[in-house]
Image (spheres, rainbow, N blue to C red):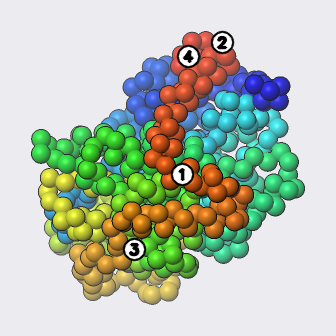
Amino acid sequence: MSDETKNARDHAMERCRERRITIPTIAQLRNPSAIPTAIQTRMPALDMQDPNPLNLFRIGWHNDPTTGGFGPVNALEIPSELSGVPARIVGLVGRYFPTGAHKVGAAFGCLVPRLVSGQFDPTRHKAVWPSTGNYCRGGVFDSALLGCKSLAILPEGMSRERFDWLRSMGAEIIATPGSESNVKEIFDACWEIRKTQPDAVIFNQFEEFGNYLWHFGVTGPAAEEAFRALAGPRSRLAAWVGATGSAGTLAAGDYLKGASSGCTITAAEALQCPTLLACGFGAHRIEGIGDKHVPWIHNVRATDLVTAIDDEATMRLFRVFNEPAGREALLRRGVPYDLVGRLPLLGISSICNLLAAIKTARHFELDAADFVLTCFTDSAALYQTRLAELTAERGEYTDRQAEADIERFLLGATTDHLRELTYPDRKAIHNLKYFTWVEQQGRTVDELGALWSTAFWTDLQGQLPSWDEAIEAFNEEAGGRGPGSGVQAEAGP
Ligand SMILES: Cc1ncc(COP(=O)(O)O)c(C=O)c1O
């Protein structure tokens, strides 16, 4: 370890000591029963959105919104009355993460390995979070918990809720031109920061393998747990479906393929920006996904199906799930009352995932023994202004409109705009990475070539245990106590 690295790590430990921070291991985030009881008993009294370091332990899928403690994985099954397919579609619910979205986990995965290994000095460095919204909110939250300075970069066209929240956290913000799919502009802002701010450390979610590994180590096992909780003796884990922004969430599929042979992976994107499906580009309204490039961390060789979802379908169904006329129409059709009350757990990209899950089920003709797992990344709470905009633009939502939207966009979801990938298809998508990553972002052809190797990904996945060892050693040295004792976190900040 160089002197600089050792100093940075010492500073990080000092910071954690001062703030009484214990960093959770991936094993604890995956399975909260491994969290020391001293910490578990303190959680119910702590608000989930508080910038209190104990909330680091909530960067997982088991937060019980009723008790404030930990419970089973948060998941919601979408029954056939709603999906129109016999397959069982189950979405992990991101609403109950701090910040209301699962991206806080991807940010944890990028920041923590660098913090505990002396590659990020919280007393000197500024953490920079390039994002289309939720990732930078997660990064700002994690930085606040760990006592680091942070800078959020996001397109100016993202929802007002995101900007309001970032301001409320006192974050420094750079708003880049454009909206959802303008990621090149975000990358350009990063290059500018590299030139002008030597103390900035950029956590680029699109290329940081910490993003991939957090999902592989936490989201994948959570999906498996949700499946096992519902599965019968003949059940089959048939597919993982994820709309791709940074492609981090797709890594859960890599885990599930290892856990259940025959599991396929569907990558979804917006029809208005079908980069994987058709080398396409364009602007769209599914916030959080579809950025006109193939992320560096996308394990393309493991992706089986690509499908594009019309953003108009997601916006219409967003109204169905959130407007009184839409909910009444669903109740009339026999969708259970309790489920209708929970549909606001789906944000716009969650609806995209639901539609992609339906298409996957239709394409493979899945039956009632088959489970399609996906992710309801964030909830309607982050898009109330979008609802108001739709009303202003199109008028009040009516019964007639709701009936038409359910028939056309939900029950009428077909296998259009979908391709099951052949080997050459996968290779073509992999090759697309060249234009962003080698031509623009300074990667080499050899590095790109390495990503095509299956061994690259299995070696990467094999790094997870060493992460936990590094976190435990860090906690032990910072606190002078046994690993995972939780004593540091006893007093809170
Ligand atoms: C709302 C929303 N949905 C989906 C995604 C895509 O997830 P991933 O970046 O893991 O591909 C994001 C990413 O920021 C998001 O914010």
Q: Is residue 134 above or below residue 411?
A: above
Report the front residue among 426 and 159: 426
Residue ID for mark 1? 451
Q: Nearer the viewer, mark 3 or mark 1?
A: 1
Residue 308 x, y percent position in the rendering: 40, 73
Say whether residue 119 is visible. Answer: yes
Residue ID for mark 2? 480
- How far is the residue under mark 1 from the one under mark 4? 34 Å
Q: Which residue is pictured at 27% across the width and 82% down the height? A: 408
- How far is the residue under mark 4 from the one under mark 2? 9 Å
- How far is the residue under mark 3 from the one under mark 2? 52 Å
The answer to which image quadrant residue 194 occupies is bottom right
Residue 440 x, y percent position in the rendering: 71, 65
Q: Is residue 349 above or below residue 23?
A: below
Residue ID for mark 4? 483
**Amino acid of disc 2:** Gly
- Of labels 1 and 4, earlier in sequence is 1
Residue ID for mark 3? 309
Q: Is residue 66 above or below residue 339?
A: above
